[in-house]
Amino acid sequence: MLNRRNLRQHPVPGRAIPTPRSAIVVGAGVVGLATAWHLRRAGLEVTVLEQDKVAAGSSWGNAGWLTPPITTPLPEPAILRTGLKALYSPNSPLYVPLRPDFTMIRFMLGFLRHSTAGAWKKAMGSYIPWNRQSLEAFDELADGGVQAPTKTPKAFLACFNEAGQNRMLMEEFEQIRDAGQPVAAELIDGDAARQIAPALSANVVEAIRLDGVRFINPPEYMTSLAEAAIAEGVQVREKVTVTDVDGGTPGRPASVTIQPGQQTSRSEHSETDPAPAGSAQEILTADAVVLASGAWIGDLAKKFGVRSVVQAGRGYSFSIPVDPAPEVPLYFPAQRVACTPLDGRLRVAGMMEFRRPDDALDPRRVQAIIGATQPMLQGADFTDRADEWVGSRPCTPDGLPLVGRTNSPRVIMAGGHGMWGVTLGPLTGRLLAEDITTGVAPEMLAPFNPLR
């Protein structure tokens, strides 16, 4: 763990810029806040800029799973086997609306090109070192003051409504093992699954019990992470839009131009009154700028040599009451739906649609989740839905995050994690803090080079 309050203030031999004393992090999701926490613990003055509020994006409404055994590249051969026609159905777990969009076309061509066995295996090899350390990174945050717990369930169940339907997932587990990552998975029948989760309906005929996973309550955890960062001395400024980033030079700091809205500033000592909307632009300077703005990251990164498309992969969720309430996470692989017990209700999350991040919630997608999930549960009231939500996960064509330095040594990328931003966010923050403060990029960052 980095914990150097008295950071060296002289240049490190061989690095492009002097050792940073300050940093600006753009984005207050799990990746941005974890990075800010680690940088502050390393001795930097850190400001986080958020266009909405803490965890307003995909860090809030996701399933909250911490699942290293199944953290894998999103492009996979099964997508090609399913057939491209299915991608254009609003009821499909993976949905691509038909519309003229050059960015979408670029993304989909790259995505399909990487949906091969060879590309998947190579990308999986890049994930394995991260998966081995991802849960330890959560323990480090807990030791450092993050109060919200990570929960270890007595089981994690992937459930199926047809006999033999488990084969595709079991084959994927074998591929993951062949790539070098252990997976502890056991096939059980439907009755054994209902012993663990009585809310499963009689339609569930078999399940895979998976170990080595945890889960969090995303809103609770994100609030706690923000509080821990603020307690360390990080300043969090909400409701500010970053309109430009200047990478500076080796001898001149980077700068960030912001347009405040109804701005709120939170720090260790105070919370200011909101600034009036439409306030004049400000220019902030820092020795390093970390771009961690999720699905919007590509707009800021283009000028720094990042050619990879970052496409919003939008997911949906809502919560429902279930009696008896499940105590373990449930996954329905054929339906691509994830269910997590949170605050006495069941959060139901699913779907992946490639659309613009600011598009409105599509009610058809909510209904598709209901239609897919309802036969798998008993005692669930889908009419009593709360917190209907859509959020945009930042996806890349090759399924690998963009983490590391751009062509400006002062501008660092921290995004493109797709569905795995929560699982890998704390570790991303730790590795980036090491890179920024020492000038030496950890070897684990190499496959995720933003300039690849």
Image (tube, rainbow, N blue to C red):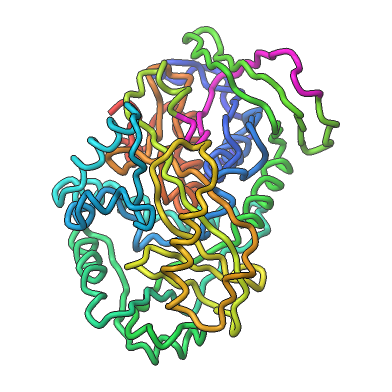
Residue 10: x and y, percent?
54, 17
Question: Residue 225, image x and y in percent?
Answer: 64, 49
> Relative to 162, is 432 on the left or the right?
right
Q: Nearer the viewer, residue 15 or 224?
A: 224
Residue at x 59% of width, y 22% of height: 242
Q: How many marks?
A: 0
* The image quarter in which residue 181 lies: bottom left
Query: Does 12 appear above or below 432?
Result: above
269 shown above or below 203: above
In the picture, the quarter occupied by the C terminus is top left
Q: Is residue 46 left or right of residue 16?
A: right
Q: Residue at x 33, y 77 (%)?
A: 160
Judged left or right of residue 419, residue 113 is left
Relative depth, front residue between 92 and 313 = 92
- Seen from the viewer's position, the closer of residues 157 and 451 is 157
Residue 20: say if magenta: no
- The span shown in magenta is 276-297
Q: Position of residue 384 (x, y in %)?
A: 64, 69
